[in-house]
Amino acid sequence: MNLPDRLSLAHLPTPTEPLAQLSEQLGRAMFVKRDDLTGSHLSGNKVRKLEFLLAEAVANEATHVITCGGVQSNHCRATALAAASLGMVPVLLLRTANGERADLPSPSTGNVLLGVLAGAEVHLCDPDGYRHGRQDRMAQLAQAIADRGGRPIIVPEGGSSTLGALGYVNAARELVEQLGPGPPTSVLVAVGSGGTLAGLAMGFKALGAPFRAIGIPVCDDAATFRTIVHDIAAPAARYGLPALSTDDYELVDGFQGQGYALTTPPELACIRDAVRRDGLVLDHVYTGKAFGALLDLAGRRPCSLAERVVFVHTGGIFGLAAAGAQLDELPGHASPNTVNNAA
Ligand SMILES: Cc1ncc(COP(=O)(O)O)c(C=O)c1O
């Protein structure tokens, strides 16, 4: 392995902790890799990617960092906070319902709040314009900045380029060091843009460890993500990483639910139970769906998992903080409105 220089943005190594109750309940050794603890505001999986992506930006003396994502994108929030702390201007292209200011939460909440606090220049796009035109929009923004004498760099959606995925090659190394190389281990992670899964799979393969990354798509399907992971991993030979084949990792469909950032009462109940049983605060967009998949596979298809299982908690708490209205709808959920203060 021949990884390039990176910045130190994340608090590493993140802990890997046993999930005591679940281990007993499911009859196998269950662990959680706490990548929700890479930092406080600068937290979650995106920070590991940004260590490499923004090292390149600093080396190129970038003045502006342009990236894109959904309105409550964790990646956009982390990029904005990290770029600002390095003296660069964050420029965010956010996808909203109609591409209009009125779509933004008012007052600002969650990731949007932090992005704005970091001084991000915010541009909006409707879903169709985002799907088909985000690269062009970001290129136009970059051109306008360059015309004014700035030096912009564009970070792709989710930070999921080959360079960004190296953050998870590092995480794979960390995990193997923390748990030791055996026994065979399944490592589950949510998949939104593919870089985290690609990095873990490349890392485990490079280390020759019997760890198998299992990706749970939260949008799109497994076939789409196989192509994306392939495209991320293909150029990684330049960093001394082995070629990745589809046998080196898994993608399991069936847990996208109603689609990206949409949620259902059973998914919300799974999030609530994880707080109370495991002390984990998951989110409704990524980690809640992946954790639901873990419970489902361990219960209904136990042979699909190795004897040791690790769930990678990739963060997302600020997105959950913007979803209070949905959680308050959950049957049996005690929102402040339903607590009897007189008791
Ligand atoms: C909290 C969280 N978990 C998981 C993911 C998925 O990671 P990736 O985009 O690398 O597939 C993301 C971002 O998309 C995220 O914000």
Image: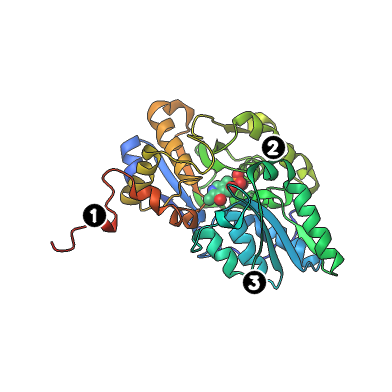
Give the residue at x 34% y 47%: 272
> Around disc 3, counting alpha carbons within 10 Å, would you say few (fewer than 14), some (14 to 19), or many (20 or more)?
few
The residues bearing labels 2 and 1 have C-alpha atoms spaced at a distance of: 45 Å
Residue 259: image location, x then y, percent: 52, 37
State the colouring used for the structure image. Answer: rainbow
Q: Is residue 343 visible?
A: yes
Residue 40: image location, x then y, percent: 50, 65
Q: Secondary structure at mark 2?
A: helix
Query: Within the image, what quadrant is residue 231 found in?
Result: top right
Amino acid type of the residue that numbered disc 1 sits on in the rendered structure: Thr
- Which residue lies under the disc numbered 3? 85
- Which residue lies under the disc numbered 2? 228
In the displayed structure, does residue 29 sit left or right of residue 91?
left
The residues bearing labels 3 and 2 have C-alpha atoms spaced at a distance of: 30 Å
Residue 242: image location, x then y, percent: 73, 40
Give the residue at x 80% y 47%: 238
Query: Within the image, what quadrant is residue 263 found in?
Result: top left
Query: Within the image, what quadrant is residue 337 found in?
Result: bottom left
Amino acid type of the residue that numbered disc 2 sits on in the rendered structure: Ile
- Which residue lies under the disc numbered 1? 338
- Please state, as top left, top right, bottom left or bottom right, where the C terminus lies in the image: bottom left
Q: Is residue 321 above or below residue 194?
A: below
Say if disc 3 is inside 8 Å of ligand 1. no
Say if disc 1 is inside 8 Å of ligand 1. no
Which of the marked residues, 2 or 1, is nearer the chain's N terminus? 2
